Image (cartoon, rainbow, N blue to C red):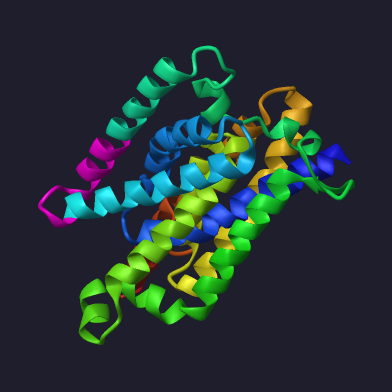
Amino acid sequence: MSDFWIILTGALVASACGFLGCFLILRRMAMLGDAISHAILPGIVIAFLLSGSRASLPMLLGAAAFGLITTFMIQSLSQNGVQADAAISVTFTALFSIGVILVSIFTRQVDLDLDCVLYGEIAYVPWDTLEIFGVDLGPRAVWGVSGAFLISFILITLFYKQFKICSFDPAMAAAIGIPVTLFHYLLMGMVSVTTVASFESVGAILVVAMLIVPAATAYLLTDRLSIMLMLSVVVGILSSIGGYLSARQLDVSIAGCMTVMAAILFALAFLFSPKHGVITRWWIRRQLRIQLFEKNNSV
């Protein structure tokens, strides 16, 4: 049964992250997930200091708040002349450093270190369960990530046209009356909540990888956003299943194998994509040269 929960958690994380990652890829904000996963450290520490416990809810709220603060700071810097990649780097390094200092000062005698708050272990997911009135409802991570994915799915389904236009052509969206800034922060809020809901259980590396790699793979396979969203979920699920089976065979890190499997699927798409694949384009050019050569000889 533990195998099922681990695969399900990995698949949910991959689906939730890959679904939102499509919009990050289109907006050229691929490293935002990495920034959020590090910049929320001060929020976790402050939540611990205020609540006096390591309960999940206070830390989730604190982390989510700093996730939104991170996106606000990045957007503000970008709108005032700082390049987007520089804004992301400056923001997350500054906030992460503040979090490291807070951990060093206030939590020396408490089990709240960087490994604890930043890097989870997906193998432990089946034993961290949610109980209500003595009823075991399954792993907390499954419920948390499922909730984040459901919220993202509902919002993007309701406002699909607005998110699509804002991602492809923000100037046009503003011209036809779509509140671009509102939908930007709505998307960034979903990314923050999904990242926070995922990283404590499965690890920051897996979350960052699943935000980008499945979406990038889907981007190579189609030019339609709706299909790209579905393919990113499929690629994420395949990465989760294949990565877990590989980890069991090799007796190595589960999150690491899931990330490697996602990278392998990306490499296959990069090489063999019907339209953008390197080998596919080479083969098409080769066939055209052969046809041209045969045509010239026949004349």
- Where does the N terminus fall, quadrant-wise? top right
Range of the magenta residues? 79-92
Q: Residue at x 40, y 44 (%)?
A: 66
Question: Can residue 123 be seen in the rendering of this structure?
Answer: yes
Taking 46 as reference, is 152 above or below it?
below
Q: Residue at x 26, y 48 (%)?
A: 73
Q: Main secondary structure of the magenta part?
A: helix
- In the rendered structure, the answer to whether residue 123 lies left or right of residue 96 reads right
Q: Is residue 227 magenta?
A: no
Question: Can residue 12 be seen in the rendering of this structure?
Answer: no
- x, y percentage for residue 67? 41, 47
- In the rendered structure, the answer to whether residue 15 lies left or right of residue 180 reads right
- x, y percentage for residue 219? 45, 60
- In the rendered structure, the answer to whether residue 26 lies left or right of residue 73 reads right
Question: Where is residue 149, by image quadrant?
Answer: bottom right
Q: Residue at x 41, y 63 (%)?
A: 187
- Which residue appears farthest toward the bottom when viewing the image? 176
User: Which is nearer the eye, 175 or 240?
Assistant: 175
Q: Residue at x 75, y 40 (%)?
A: 6
- x, y percentage for residue 86? 20, 41
